[in-house]
Image (cartoon, rainbow, N blue to C red):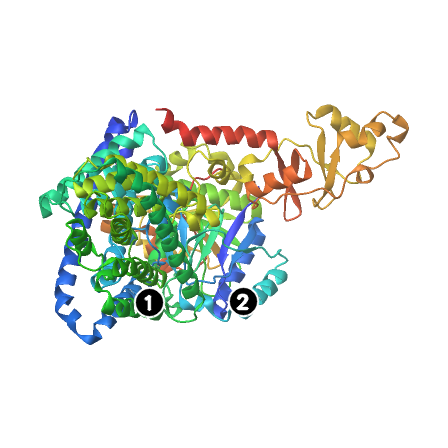
Amino acid sequence: MYSQLFHIFRNTPLGRETFLQSLYFCNQVDTTPVVYIPEFIKFLMYFDNDVVQVDLDESYLTDPATAEDHARILLDSANLKPNFFTPKNFTASTLPDIPTNFEFMCCPRSISDLSSKIGLGYIGPRVRRIVTSARFPVLITSAVYKPWTRLVVFFGGSANALNALKLGMRIARQTGMPLDIFTQAENRSREDYAAIIRDHHMEDELERLQQRWIFFDEGKFETNLYAVPHDALVILGAYGHGLIRNLVFGSKMENIQSTIPNNLLIVGPNYTAGI
Amino acid sequence: MRSPISWRPPATWHFFRSDDRLLLILAGAIVGICSGVAAVALNQSLIAVLGYLRPYRAYWWAFVLPAVGAALSSLFLNKIMREGAGHGVPEVIYSVSRYGGLMRFRSSFSRLISSCLTIGSGGSAGPEAPIVMSGSAIGSNIARLLGLNDRQRVTLVGCGAAGAISAIFNAPIAGLIFAMEIILGEWAASNLIPIAIAAVAGTEISHLLQGKQIPFSHHHFNIGAVDIVACIGLAVFTALASIMLTRAIRTIHHQADGIQLPSWLKAAGGGCAVGLIGLYLPMVLGEGYHAIREMMEGRFAPGIGLVFLAVLAKIMATALTLGSGGSGGIFAPCLVIGSFAGLTYHRALAYLWPGVDWVQEGCFVLLGMAGLVSGILQAPLTGIFLIVEITGGYEVILPLIIVSAISTTICHYMEPASFYLKDLVEKGQLMRPGTDARVLADLEVHELLETDCITVHTDMLLRDFVDIVKQSRRNLFPVEDQSGQFQGMIYMDDIRPYLFDPLMYDAVLVGQLMNPRVETVSPDDDVVEVLERMDAEGLFNMPVVANHRFRGMISKSTLLDQYRKELMVQTYHLNR
């Protein structure tokens, strides 16, 4: 299947790390990178039922004269064909529209705020809106380029978690990397979680792919996260419980991203996965 | 675990799923009320700002007031709200025609504040376009909250526009027609009722909060046959003024775009120029309704020369305000320019034929407004009903129709697209539902992919290929090399002689038979461009290739099939 990853190139050392991470992802999952070198500080993304205005951090416009050359060098080094995106439609003269029909998108933890604020425990509001509205999973990269050699899927039994698991299985098949499932029990037994997987006819395929099911029925969630391998791409669902519960109880995804520095592939509530 | 409190959008409730008309009517009423409140808020804010600044207008330095207002407005829009500037209405039409009416939440209030700063300080612009944008954005965001689909959202955007125009002018029919004629560009029965409800709700909110006032008081006019004949000349005059206004705004806008200065400084420059004009002709400042009232009542003292100069000055002031980056609309300036044009024309007639018993000059003022609005918007119904409602009289309907129709026709002849649509048409971004451009824009190459082709390899013998031909239902075959890279195509028509010559079966390879110079399509290509290439080359099929790999075929027959399905989706509501 032909798929594309949308990457907004930032012509800075931090942007290079993010781009390298995108390129590694593309090579692993046989995806074509589509690179956007922004000319304007803001753009719009029209999703199915939402429009998100992304106001980029000023560093995205750093030294535009060298940006394309830098991106080309990195693309060449990863043996990937340059595919630069030029906006065709504009809502206003300085406000381009970016398509939303990609299969993946790469974001740093924040694209609107100063990069000095980027760190664990902080996901910018725009990245959050994109995750919530997008049909595609969002790759949130670690601050420094680090290849991953295995996959970890967080599975809590929700519809979003099932989508994340399906995506994890697809990537495991494509890459041949081992797939671990990480579950923190929440008033349910291991058998209950297994039943959910069985009900969705994923048991056999999972048995073939899965290396381990890391199941925690006790201990603090944040403490148990130490068990996540440092070199794993972590795949998880986000904001699947609705706004009110997320506001009251907090989002599990926010917990995870604030604790582990791994690359994250986040599946939002509008993503629909096929095995 | 399910959340104890969960929000399910009303669009998914069982009650509304079988028929969404009740939902749209209820939502339309809510949108109409909200946009009515926004319109009243803008109106009252403008009254307050104008009242506050009135004492300062007597000073010699008052010409800087519009500059300060325009600069603050630009800074607010660009730095605080981070919105791209614009007149508002084109953005609404763009969103309706391209993205199912999706609009940002910030647009529901940003233009209210920025236009208040521009107009309140004396900039020559009107509050209608900003309030239309706010009302439409309110409609769009309420639709998002209710989980409505694109078609329903577009209806609520129309409701927002109708509610806003109805409230600001106290004119529900004009609001309804404006939404249908200009914003939606179609007359679907399913849209009509919710928009009518929104228009009534907006008007009633305005009545409730501001009282039942119409902008201009009603006057009785004795219109004779000679006046009706004279209307033809007025229509020509107002059409020319409309063209001049459209071109002046666009020229100054393009000139300002080319100047390498911060946008707030450009807006300030435009505002300063308007302030200087206002020192000599104060009637061109602000929305200018006071001057219209005087003209309609026959109390406007300046002579014909000065009134004609006011037509030109108001056109220039509006172009400077809006073209340099000020925030506001062209509705109110059109009314003012139209009234000056009508008065000029009437006085010219009276001067040339003093013996004729002409109707009062207020009537021509009113007709001039209709001519300008109809000409610049190229929307005759909006012009006619707006003037009828804001002046409270139907006895002028006949000359109104004549002036509006002729003015629209002349403007359409000289400028094929209206002021609101011109930029969109030039960029190919005006895509009304059900039109060829819109249907094709909604199709993507990956939706049209035919993946039932059998791929063959370059080093395959003709004998093996013949076996594959027997199994295949298609008469074209993509060819790849051993690494899977696309090399070309085999078309049955090209190789038929070889197929019937068994001596060739073990002597010829597929790589020797294929056509390596085939036109290919990328999955990212625009369907319109693909179709144009097919037409230009006389092709019915093209291979889709990405990263040197064959992904499928795209054909005209599949395109027609999908085109029809998409057209049915887009025009479904027209048949309800």
| SS label for mark 1 | helix
Q: Are marks 1 and 2 in contact (CB under 8 Å)?
A: no
Instruction: Give the left or right position of residue B510, taking residue A202 as reference.
Output: right
Alpha carbons under labels 1 and 2: distance apart = 36 Å
Which residue is painted at 69% across and 27% down in the image?
A: B474
Q: Position of residue B545 (x, y in %)?
A: 64, 44
Which residue is painted at 47% across and 52% down in the image?
A: A105
Within 10 Å of disc 1 (Cα), the crowding (few <14, some 14-19, many 20+) is many
User: Which chain is mark 2 on?
Assistant: A
Which residue is painted at 27% across and 64% down in the image?
A: B73
Q: Position of residue B490 (x, y in %)?
A: 75, 35
| SS label for mark 2 | helix
Which residue is painted at 14% across and 50% down in the image?
A: B297
Q: Which residue is mark 2?
A: A67
Within 10 Å of disc 2 (Cα), the crowding (few <14, some 14-19, many 20+) is some
Which kind of residue does numbered mark 1 sit on?
Gly
Q: Which residue is mark 1?
A: B270
* Quadrant for the N terminus of chain A in the image: top right
Residue furthest to the front? B355
Instruction: Give the left or right position of residue A144, taking residue B540 as reference.
Output: left
**Front residue of B461 and A111:** A111
